[in-house]
Image: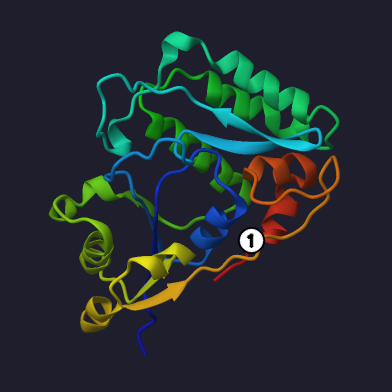
Amino acid sequence: MKEKKIIAIQQPEHLPWLGFFDKMKKCDQYIYLDSVQFKKRYFENRNKIRFDSESKWLTVPIMTKSKYHQNINEVLIDNEQKWQRKYIDTIRHAYAKSNFLDAFYPDLTKIIETKYERLVDLNVAIIDWARKLLEISTPVMMSSELKECKDKKGSDLILEICIQLNADVYISGPFGRDYLEHEKFKKADIEIEYHDYTHPVYKQLHEPFISHLSFIDCLFCEGAEGVKALIQNR
């Protein structure tokens, strides 16, 4: 029997959470959904880390003036703000007492200090760095590479990507239950599985535990092996 091809589709988030990589490990191909509209105040240009007893946003400034509707792959970083120093200093101060700061901070700093023009390129550089650390070999591609999908939206866009890539199973985030048209997927002979990732508890620098932070919180506290133990193979 032919093994089913499993794919997942996700916006290329900034400093993603653990569930992002858990889903990536569970599929045969991972598609960065970069051809959809950028969402302000979401996770494309920011994410949270632990800072003392609270969580704190790390944000990459972007060009928004007169750009009311732009796709993720069109968003430009506002490098006029000289944001990188504050960004990396915040990480260093937050995790100064962590066991693994020295192991991973220099490489992350190099990525942040690189002057990327597009937000998506910065995000993918961080994700690629994490993939190497976590030994995730799942093939990846951009949805913008699939020209046949450019006029599709919502559930139809996800379905068309699945069809173009000959998927047998689509792994959706839990919010897919709110908009995916199951009958259309069934008609196309594509199964939908929902990725209901239960966030693990690990030892942070402070208590009480705060979940759903960027993966770097776990990385600096538990190391790459610790993160690998919290994301599962297919």
- Taking the image as shown, residue 148 lies to the left or right of residue 177, namely left
Viewer-proximal residue, 167 or 55? Answer: 55
Q: Nearer the viewer, residue 179 or 11?
A: 179
- The quarter holding residue 93 reads top right
Is 121 rendered above or below residue 209?
above
Q: What residue is rendered at 38% in x and 67% in y?
A: 178
Residue 197 place in picture, x, y as percent:
59, 65
Q: Is residue 127 left or right of residue 157?
A: right
Q: Nearer the viewer, residue 230 or 83?
A: 83
Between residues 16 and 112, which one lies in front from this camera angle? Answer: 16
Residue type, numbered disc 1: Ile
Badge 1 element:
loop
Quadrant location of the C terminus in the rendered image: bottom right
Residue 58 location, quadrant:
top right
Please identify the quadrant where the N terminus is shown.
Answer: bottom left
Residue 122, percent across and down? 45, 30
Determine the residue positioned at 28% across, 73% down. 181
| 63 displayed left or right of 160 | right
Residue positioned 62% across, 43% down in the render = 214
Q: How many marks?
A: 1
Residue on which the image places disc 1: 231
Q: Position of residue 56 (x, y in %)?
A: 66, 33
Which residue ends up furthest to the bottom in the rendered image?
1
Q: Position of residue 35 (x, y in %)?
A: 26, 45
Residue 173 to residue 142: above or below: below
- Residue density around tag 1, few if under 14, some if 14–19, many if 20 or more, within 10 Å: many
Residue 132 falls in which quadrant of the image? top right
